[in-house]
Image: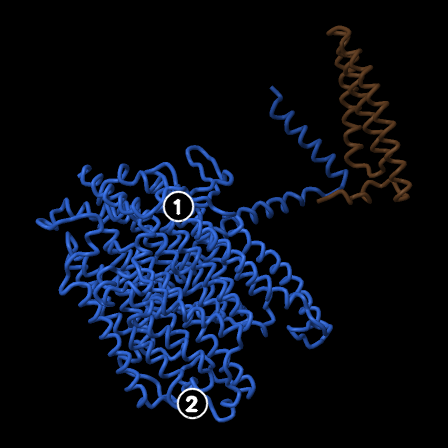
Amino acid sequence: MNAVLALSAVLFAIGTLGVLVRRNAIIMFLCIELQLNAVNLALVAFSRAHGIDGQIFVFFVMTVAAAEAAVGLAIIIAIFRHYETVDVGSFNLLKW
Amino acid sequence: MASAVVLLAQGGQEVVEGSAAHASFDPLLPGLIVLLPLIGFLVNGALALSHAKKSADAVRVGEEYDPHTGSGGGRDLTHTLPSWIGPGVMLGAFILVLANFARMFGADLHDPVVLEYWTWMATGTLEVSVSLQLDPLSMIMMLVITGVGFLIHVFSVGYMKDDVGYPRYFAYLNLFVFFMLVLVMGANLPLLFVGWEGVGLCSYLLIGFWFGDREKSDAGKKAFIVNRIGDFGFLIAMFLLFTVFGTLDFVAINAGAEASLVYGGAMVTAITLFMLLGASGKSAQIPLYVWLPDAMAGPTPVSALIHAATMVTAGVYLVARTSVLFALSPVGSVTVAGIGAATALFAATIALVQTDIKKVLAYSTVSQLGYMFLGVGVGAYAAGVFHLMTHAFFKALLFLGSGAVIHSMHHAYHATHSHEDAQDMRNMGGLRRYMPWTALFMWIATLAIAGIWPFAGFFSKDEIIWYAGASAVGPFAPLYTVFWVVALAAAMLTAFYMTRMMVMTFHGANRTGEEERGHLHEAPLTMTVPLSILAFLSIFGGWINVPEKIRTSFLGGGGALPMSEWLHDWLDPVVHAAVVVREEALVAAGALAGQEHHYGFLEHAPVGGGELTWALISTLLAAAVVAGTFILGARWAIRPAKESAPLAGVKKLLYDKWYVDEFYDAVVVKPILGTSRFLWRWIDRGIDFVVGGVGGVTKGVGWVGSLVQTGSVNVYAFVLTAGVLVILWFTRF
């Protein structure tokens, strides 16, 4: 149990670090997916001790992640068509 | 006391009952009387707008604009139509008024005819309707306004026809008559106030008619602002009346005054004093007279119509209309009389040395208005209105005559391109050779205003002076004696300055200049015919109200002459209650112990050698002053304005109008301006600074905050994560 939770924490930390330090939008996107899945892993682990609720949550998270993937990828494609790059450092027009 | 009121009232009623049949008065199209000038205004106003556009278009394309023919040649309707519409609607209104006047004869006039048209406002207990009141007083005013007004409109056709603003002039003039009729026909105070403000507006528009001249537009503003001070008093009086009576209809106020107000009480005194403030603003009395002399900046027929014959008498009308209130307040009445007497003398002293022909007439008007106030203040309401009427005749004549003179002088100077002052009497002299008719008519008016028998002014002015002396009974007796002496002195001054004006204008050698002399001419018929009608009225207008004693003794019976105390009886239904209250109070105060008293006894009170003696004395004195001035005037060495030496001493003091304008400027205008400037600079700007500062600070903070919005997704993600970590740290237990 503790080992599973530790793995989940490590995965989440990697995901978070990836979102923070990487500039490629697709990599950042993948890191977000990694965070979500780390949470899923933790939820599954908890469900062993506290009942079925955790696993139900996982389905919800997967659903939302699928929707997010669809919208997020669409946005990235649209941005790429416009800027011909997926470096997030280039899109800073949305200020003030 | 109550029984005495009933007795006096009955005595008065019988007199009227004996002379009048009992058919009630049935007005003929009274609404149309008011509407006709309004229609005239609308049509002339539309023409004025179209005219202004045409002349502006002509100027824009660089054409010479001739006001007679328009830019395209041929007759310009916007210029010719007002000549017919302006005087036309006035004639129509005058004929309607005459028809109503004829109907009023033989009718029962005890109760005024009030015609309600529609409810104007109904809020809470206040209900004001648009209703017209026809009674003897409003009828006299309507006759003067439409009759004299019509003549002045006709005169204006001749006087103003070369002016580019001709249609606009007639539009304003018609609008003025409309408001003036509303003022005198309105059956309640708010409606009167509409007319009151409306004539003030038209006065402002017409004083500043030539608004391109800064001085003239300033004079208009001055008139408007000074009147506003008076209007404040009028409004307060109206509020007080409403708190007492719960209504503002004249009929209800006059009927309920004795029951609702205590004789000499604080309330009625406050009401009358505030009302007097309003009246003194409109009627140019001390301390608010300063606007009237400046109002001479307007075209001369305007001075004749608005600033001599009609609008400025509105204050006298107001006092006569609410006479019961003034009768109930001895303090209010004596203040009215005192202000009247003081103004009569004060303005007369200024008129002594003025050189501008219109300024002399302006101060003379202020002085004569003072007489009217003295009349209504001493309880001679009918005499005050009588003087109002005769004054409308002879002062309109004087102003129009001076207009004809100025017109001629202006043409002469215009022809030679001279820039001399066409209104300065020092530049005139000997004009009777060039304009004999005008000179003759103006002499008639001069004799009338000087109070020479048998011209109109004699009867009206002497009646007022007589009343002032006769009123010297009761609590304020010494004051009334002073007023009487002051009025007599002012009458002598009047005789002097009017004769001086005539001598300087029409007699002696001509000082216009060699070249200009040939261009002097008599006024056209459109101007001289109205003058002749007014001259006729100035001679005979006084005969409608000759006291019985003078009629019987002065004229040896007088049966052959068409003279009577007509106006006095005519106005009796309006002022009856006031006269009763006044005399009744004197009887109760024991001022007339041992004397017989009956309705109207004050008129016949014994003073000195009686009416006849005083009438003789005053007319002989006035005649002596006129003759003396005329003879001495022949020897005056008058030089044209540009060669005249500046005045010194008392003459300079009088010429500069006792420095009242300067005094007001220093005491009222400057402090107000200074305070305003201080408030603007320190208080207003301080508030602006605080309010603006709040906005500025918010803006600055917002700007600093906006720096956080880098637009970089990494930064956002980092801040988000950091935030989550911080929250986690604080909620770890």
Residue drawn where x is 82% and y is 40% of the image: A88
- Chain letter, brown: A
Horizontal side of residue B624 vs A15, given as left or right: left
- Looking at the rendered image, the disc whose residue lies closer to the viewer, 1 or 2, is 1
Which SS class for mark 2?
loop
Judge by depth and name the residue closer to the eye, B462 or B131: B462
| Res. B685 visible in picture | no
The spot of residue A1 in percent (x, y) is: 76, 11
Looking at the image, is B395 positioned above or below residue B258? Answer: below
Residue B340 picture quarter: bottom left
* Residue labelled with disc 1: B107
Above or below — where is B117 with respect to B80? above
Badge 1 or badge 2: first in the primary sequence: 1
Q: Residues within 10 Å of mark 2 (few under 14, many from 20)?
A: many
Instruction: Measuring from the top left, give residue B205's x and y in whole percent.
Output: 51, 62
Residue nearest the observer in this picture, A63 or B592: B592
Instruction: Output the chain of dot 1.
Output: B
Chain B, colour shown: blue
Which quadrant holds residue B393?
bottom left
Chain to which mark 2 belongs: B
> Which amino acid, mark 2?
Asn
Question: In whole angstroms, how far apart are the C-alphas of marks 1 and 2?
Answer: 56 Å
**Residue B72: x percent and y percent?**
73, 72
The tag on residue B510 is 2
